[in-house]
Image (cartoon, helix red, strand yellow):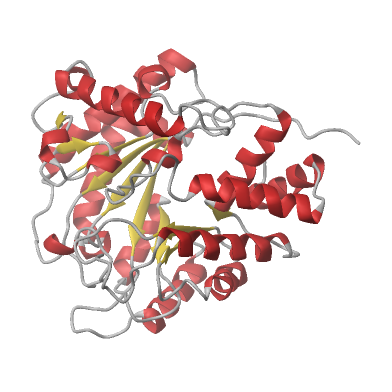
Amino acid sequence: MDRIKHVEPSPPINWIVKASKLCNLRCRYCYEWNDLANPSRMSLDQWDRLLRSIRWYHQHRVKEVGASVRTVIIWHGGEPLLLPPDYISDVMRIQRRWLGHELNEGTVRNTLQTNLYRVTDAHLDLLERERIHVGISMDVFGGVRLDAAGRETETTVARNIERLQDRGIAFGGIAVLAAHTKDRLRRVYDFYEGLGVPLRVLPLFDAPLNVPEADFHLQYADMVSALRDLFRYWLTRRRPIAVYPLITYLDTVLRRRQGRPCAPYDRAQNGEWAILVDTDGMAYQVPDCYDRTRAMGNLFEQSLHNLLRSPAYEDSLNRDQLVRQKVCGSCEYRGPCSTLPLFESRREGWHGERCAIAYEMYGAVGEELRVRRMGEHRVEAFLQRTTGH
């Protein structure tokens, strides 16, 4: 039987743009909790400056690695669909000024992360017209994602999902793994499988209200246990959808079996994976937001070209290297694992020798494959079914 050929796509450059922090929900695990009532937003002039940096970096990376470079501009919040449609349209007009060729080619695209609690027809028209992919934050089960009056939101969001489907607007789901979803991940999965869309399960992260006594708080061991149970269930599905980070865990274990490394997450060598830009223009690595002592610079006040040559940026590279050496240096998955799981979220309370979740899941996935006697080809075929490549 022929082995599936491996094509290694370049990871996208993700620009996580905090256009506004204003939100109509009060999700108790939200890391933006302290700013959800703040109506401030980026001005169009500030967007213009930011988009020039985005264009410069995209073209800079194309010169370094070729035409496979992809850039994703992620509208984040707060709740981006509280921004007026005219404002979003004006930003898209500025994007076409600086990135029109890349937008037409599809090498630059927009994603909008929303709670989908309030969406007007004008917003739907805009999403459809501009071909903006939508990420919907919905846990399926209530108790945490409440509106400003303390009411549950899931029924309203489900109705709005139907409106997206009626329009043919592409979307995926994000569900937070916390105490209220820990024992229900299979049913969360069933909901999104029924829609036929990809799902990202996001383990609970640092946030102002995420303290041990919070009723949604979850220990790392419980997160691993819930993800392992979901992994078992996922393998049994006849028409499985893409589930992240399970795909990442499975791919890493397969690479280790095959002795096949992946491109390391090394910003100095391979460029940026994600840059978070706050409403005031301050640029951060994701684990560093919003620690101003670790900000890399301000993209409303300096070009990205100058930021990448600054002492603050050099400091951020040095921090990456130190934590990578400490946590990943002697790890048996180093090489097959890109080390990116170490940098995807802020987890100040973790001081272990290995990644809090990914390392444990690599072992759990490997054991599950052994028990099921899933060889390399079956794993490759399963990954291809879920990802399409």
Q: Is residue 42 left or right of residue 136?
A: left
Going 36% across and 65% down the picture, which residue do you hit? 124
Asked if 65 appears above or below 100 in the picture, the reply is: above
Give percent across and percent down for residue 253.
Answer: 65, 40
Q: Is residue 186 left or right of residue 269?
A: right
Q: Quadrant of the N terminus?
A: top right
The quadrant holding residue 325 is top left
Going 35% across and 69% down the picture, which residue do you hit? 116
* Front position in the image: 90 or 272: 272
Q: Is residue 193 visible?
A: yes
- Report the residue that reaches farthest toward the right: 1
Asked if 206 appears above or below 333 in the picture, the reply is: below
Q: How many marks?
A: 0
The quadrant holding residue 260 is top right
Q: Is residue 250 left or right of residue 291?
A: right
Q: Is residue 172 visible?
A: no
Going 51% across and 69% down the picture, which residue do you hit? 165
Q: Quadrant of the C terminus?
A: top right
* Front position in the image: 131 or 173: 173
Give percent across and percent down for residue 348.
Answer: 27, 48
* Front position in the image: 360 or 275: 360
